[in-house]
Amino acid sequence: MTKEEIKELIDIFSAASIGKIQIKQGEFEISLEKQGAIVENPILACPPPPAPTPININVANDSNKPSSKHENTLTSPMVGTFYEAPSPGAAPFAKVGQTLKKGDTICIVEAMKIMNEIEAEYDCKIISRLVDNGQPVEFGTDLFVVEKL
């Protein structure tokens, strides 16, 4: 800033009803404060973000049953992305009609760039798959309908 610009800034500041100002432009920085001025409402450089708009959601819970629509399901233990196979083009871990033993890998849920192998909780037969490959899932999302063995 030139001397003339600084003088003009001081004149404007003196006439304004603010007690303190700080300006930073590149490496140049100037701070002005009136003697004995009480700063009640400091002016922020950035206005605060607007408050989020509330969304009304009606949830009906008629019973204390689990949210599963199916009697026997294998569910996601975490939030992430469902993958049916270890890599694109590879055979799926679990196919409809396949019998699995407890501990067999049924799918992968990717969470924060970590591939988590999800295992069968008990011996079972896959009746149907409920989510598509690459679909996001939540904690407790039903992944497969199964028949316990």
Image (cartoon, grey):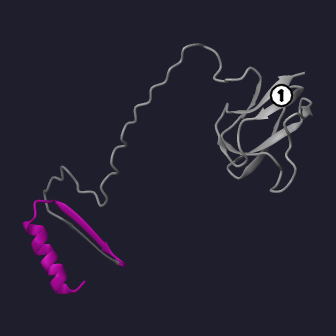
Q: Residue 7 vs residue 136: left or right?
A: left
- Note whether residue 44 is visible: yes
Residue 95 highlighted magenta (yes or no): no
Where residue 115 sits: x, y (%)? 77, 48
Where the N terminus falls, by quadrant?
bottom left
Q: Quadrant of the C terminus?
A: top right
**Front residue (pair 34, 73):** 73
115 to the left or right of 53: right
Q: Is residue 94 left or right of residue 60?
A: right
Coordinates of residue 9 in the picture (x, y in percent): 16, 75
Q: Which residues are magenta?
A: 1-27
Taking the spot 86% from the left edge, 43% from the top edge, the residue there is 93
Residue 117 visible in the current orientation: no
SS under mark 1: loop
The percent coordinates of residue 133 (x first, y second) are: 73, 47
Disc 1 target residue? 121
